[in-house]
Amino acid sequence: MKISTKGRYALRLMLDLAINNTGEYIPIKRIAERQEISEKYLEQIITQISRAGFVRSVRGSQGGYQLANPPEEYTVGMILRLMEGELSPVACLDEPGSCDRADRCVTVDVWRQIKDAVENVVDNITLADLVKSYNEKGTCEYFI
Amino acid sequence: MKISTKGRYALRLMLDLAINNTGEYIPIKRIAERQEISEKYLEQIITQISRAGFVRSVRGSQGGYQLANPPEEYTVGMILRLMEGELSPVACLDEPGSCDRADRCVTVDVWRQIKDAVENVVDNITLADLVKSYNEKGTCEYFI
DNA sequence: TTAATTCATATCATTTCGATATGTTTTAAT
DNA sequence: ATTAAAACATATCGAAATGATATGAATTAA
């Protein structure tokens, strides 16, 4: 039941962009430094994020990334789903017909409830909420 | 964010024992047939379950397993934790001191909420609840 | 004695994870 | 023009986890 580093790093990356949402383009190198994450690994991650249209990019010297929309418009769920796929504890919830026991299945109700509970959390927290938490935590240069 | 087959199979196994909770000892072979799961794989799983004291076993011919306690006393959470470990989306929630960014961490609040939401589901469903669902689903020989 | 069963380990193929490596293309600054 | 910085693209790789299978020993009722 773990979220992969890709999902976690993507959230930190997006939160970094949200906190530094000044209009400037931020190079991935800065984020890698601040977050202490491998630059090359972050490049892979932001490539996915960029293709999804969550960020704008400018190539070349002085280039970088910025959020495509205001932090209010990104939920944690959007970001996690992009990297992790559906937030289901079992595949059968997302692949109808994948299980021929589905009609007489009892435990699927449990998995469904878990999925709903998780989604209820992640779809109701935005980057703006996290920026607020960050600011309330006092003066600190970094975060996780 | 997936639950492994061990966790899922363990729940089906325990539910099978709960449904067939007649006082008899049930060989793993029967359960493997009913659940269409590899017998040898189920053996590994029930070994863990047995060591935790969740079931009683009798060796030899006519031997098998039965629940050590009534179905009401087993939550889904107990069974999943036994196979999967803590139901946290990130390790840092369970390993204090594992992360040196913990003090200035913002995203950990998200992970904590996810964990709480999942636990709230699985710790409030018992095998007895699932047996009830099973019986309400009508006459069917099998379940998942 | 035999067959059925739990119990114990070892092994194994495949996939996933978490990266690293090696470029290319683009662009601002010099 | 040249250079350095940066996005973009793709391949590779070691380690761990996953999901089993294999082999056999110990126990017990029939």
Image (spheres, coloured by chain):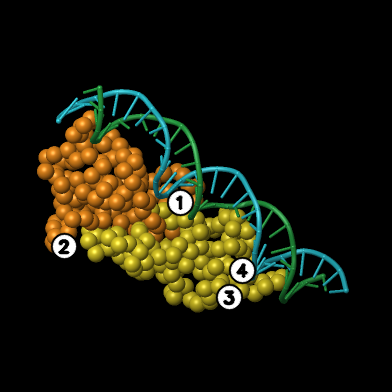
Chain colours: A yellow, B orange, C green, D cyan
Q: Name the residue under label 3.
A: A56
Q: What element carries label 4?
A: loop
Q: Share a chain, discs 3 and 4?
A: yes
Query: For the point 50% across and 77% down, which residue is it?
Result: A69
Please state the total of marks drawn on the protein image: 4
Q: Which residue type carries mark 3? A: Arg
The residues bearing labels 3 and 1 have C-alpha atoms spaced at a distance of 31 Å
Q: Which mark is residue B137?
A: 2
The chain to which mark 3 is attached is A
Relative to the observer, which residue lies in front, D24 or A8? D24
Q: Share a chain, discs 3 and 2?
A: no
The residues bearing labels 2 and 1 have C-alpha atoms spaced at a distance of 49 Å
Q: Share a chain, discs 2 and 1?
A: yes
Q: Which residue type carries mark 2? A: Lys
Q: What element carries label 3?
A: strand
The residues bearing labels 3 and 4 have C-alpha atoms spaced at a distance of 10 Å
Horizontal and vertical percent position of residue D1 = 88, 74
Q: How crowded is mark 3: few (under 14 residues within 10 Å), some or many (20 or more)?
A: some
Horizontal and vertical percent position of residue D4 = 77, 64
Q: Residue A26 carries which label?
A: 4
Query: For the point 43% across and 69% down, which residue is it?
Result: A78
